[in-house]
Each structure stands twice: as C-alpha cells, then as structure tokens.
Image (cartoon, grey):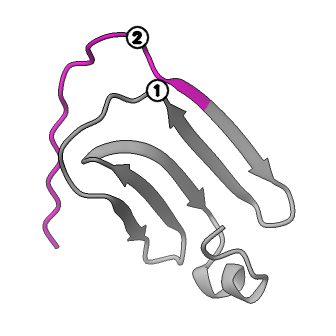
Amino acid sequence: MHFEARIEPLTGKLPKVSYRWDPETDILTVACKGVPKGNGMNGTVDLEGGDGSFVVIDVAGGRYDGVSPSLGSRAGSASRGTRGA
C-alpha cells in the first residue's frame, strides 16, 4: 500500500477541536471546525490494523476535518450498529 500526505503551514487562527467519547461503542470522535477551505478530495480514509483496530479520517476539500479511531474490531462495532456513526 502507498499513502501520501502533504503538510502545509497553517495560516490564520487555529481550528477549534472538539472531542466526543461514546461509552457504548468505545469510539472517540475528534472534529475540527474553522479549517480553511482547500482544493482536493472529500470523503473518508479508512485505515485498519492487523488486530482489527481501525481509524476513519474525514477529509473535506483535501484537508483533515476529523478522525474516529476505535480499538475494537470492525465486525464487533458493526454488530452493535456503530459503523458510520
């Protein structure tokens, strides 16, 4: 697998970062608000470890917008109805 990322200097104010922990699903969600608009893809990038852990990175305009990591397996989370939350 090949994965590329480019880190650019921040211009302007720092984005507001909010965290939310869901105790029923063991999922921590991080969201960034106030990120400057960019030109690039919109969507999500799913990364999965060999142990079943995974992280979903939200991308808007080619820029990081949020992340949802989980230490549980995808199968276990999906059976509890948490996938896509």
Q: Residue 16: within the magenta?
A: yes
Q: Which residue is mark 1?
A: 34
The residue nearer to you, when weighing 6 against 85, is 85
Compared with 15, 57 (above or below) is below
Start and end of the magenta stretch?
1-17
Q: Amino acid at mark 2?
A: Lys
Give the answer, above or below, for where 58 lies relative to 72: above
Label of residue 42 in the image: none
Q: Is 23 part of what is drawn in magenta?
A: no
In the image, 30: left or right of 10? right
Quarter of the view holding residue 11? top left
Residue 49, x across and y down, in percent: 43, 71
Q: Residue visible at 63% across and 49% down?
A: 29
Image coordinates of residue 28 in percent, x first then y, are 67, 51
- Rendered view: 12 above or below 22: above
Query: Callout 1: helix, strand or loop?
Result: loop
In the image, what residue occupies the spot 67% across and 84% down?
78
Q: Mark 1: which amino acid? A: Gly
| Secondary element at tag 2 | loop
SS majority, magenta: loop
Badge 1: how crowded within 10 Å, few (<14), some, or many (20+)? few
Mark 2 residue crowding within 10 angstroms, few (<14) / some (14–19) / many (20+): few
Q: Are marks 1 and 2 in contact (CB under 8 Å)?
A: yes
- Residue at 54 percent across and 70 percent down: it is 53
Give residue 14's position: percent from left, percent from top.
43, 15
Residue 13: mark: 2
Report whether 51 appears left or right of 7.
right
